[in-house]
Image (cartoon, rainbow, N blue to C red):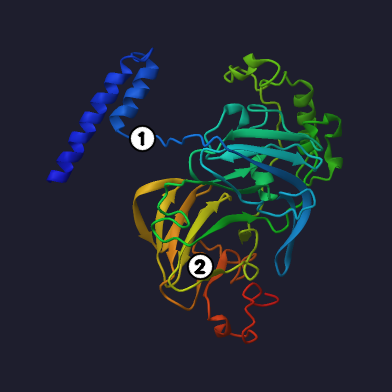
Amino acid sequence: MDRRDLLKLGALGAGTAALSGCLENIPGVNGKDGEAASALAAASVDKPEVESTGETTSYDLFLQPDTQKVAPSIEIPVWGFSDSANGPFTMPGPTLRAQAGDKLRITFNNLQDMPHTIHWHGVHLPWDQDGVPFISQEPIAGGESFTYEFEAKPAGTHWYHCHVDALHHIDMGMYGTLVFEDPDDPWRVGGPNGVTDDKVIVLDEVDKNHVHSAGAYADTQNPQNAGPESGNPMHTAEQGETVARDVANRPPNPTTEDSSQATNPAQEERDWYPATYPAYEPELNTYMLNGYCFPYTEPIRLTEGEAKRLRFVNAGTKRHSMHIHGHTFLVTHEDGHRVPDPYWKDTLDIAPGQRYDAILFADNPGIWVMHDHSGHASNNNIYPGGIFTAVAYEGFEDQLPNQPQNSGDFVRWYDDL
């Protein structure tokens, strides 16, 4: 053990003793709550704190069915988000940015005919703004709106998605990115570490044959519509009857009518969470980067000498191993939180729901690729495709094979697979 380690231990002991002394004055410190607080003190780990800015940032989110051509031969229906009632309604939805500590006021306008909510993944907020149907709130019916209000914290990269039949609705496109800027983050654009640009990269996968599903998804509002005639290929008559019965016997809304329901989730019957959804068993064969598959993926454009911040979000249910050629990522944040010691990776393994922020230093001019090394660089098992894109430096546009000279068009590398 060297002198530095001894100093660390000394500081840890002093800090723990000081915090433990403060805890003695807190009611319940000798009970369960006190034990938890003491454990946090002993760990000497600071929870991320964000001071209120006193400012309000407002957004409108609109949802409407649309279609998206994700690859030359693959066009799929989506339930797309937009920040305008006129669209376009895209998958993923718009990136919502605010300064950490701002009050966020986001109004969700459901222009579709099915119920939805929005969950704010990674955000510390009041429980009744968390967007979980029948637990945090009633689902937002078609044609209705709901305004979520919470502070933008903790700082970092987070995301939002529907939590009604979540896996299915995310696959239909109901997700987007949240960025809460930290003015003290040295890796912010314009900060002391020289970062000049900031790019969000959302990873996902879907079934290329997926369709709009109705039936049970609307039955939580209209149980009389339950049944196979809904047009949902995964919705059987038996499932329809189950949903209709559950909805008809549903207790009052626990968040607004009878708070006792919300405090007793361990009751023998499941009547406090009435909605049961059909089995969702997709064949995940279409892998997407920001809603598109190669060759429709947008390249990462670089100017030699710059440092670009990449915010990776895994909105899917599979792990994605992002590998870059000719460069190495400097990982600075995990799940929105700054890592104490940034580290180098050329292959970044990102689990479902995870976020990583990494700095890409433009120090090797040319045209390279970045792709998923988990076997997801394909469209319906045809390589190349899926999560695969170019990393293209300025001035190298005419170096691409089979491209018009100086076209600058990196988005469509070829017309068909």
Q: Secondary structure at mark 2?
A: strand
Q: Nearer the viewer, residue 201 or 215?
A: 201
> Where does the image place residue 363, in percent across and percent down from the top left?
41, 72
Q: Is residue 109 rendered to the left or right of residue 195?
A: right
Which residue is identified by label 1?
46
Q: Is residue 242 rendered to the left or right of residue 324?
A: right
Q: Nearer the viewer, residue 158 or 380?
A: 158
Residue at the outermost front position: 54
Can residue 280 be seen?
A: no
Q: Nearer the viewer, residue 295 or 220?
A: 295
Q: Amino acid at mark 2?
A: Met
10 Å crowding of disc 1: few (<14), some (14-19), many (20+) = few
230 w.r.t. 382: above or below: above
Q: Secondary structure at mark 1?
A: loop
Q: Amino acid at mark 1?
A: Asp
307 w.r.t. 211: above or below: below
Which residue is identified by label 2?
370
Q: Residue at x 42, y 73 (%)?
A: 326
Q: Is residue 143 rendered to the left or right of residue 43?
A: right
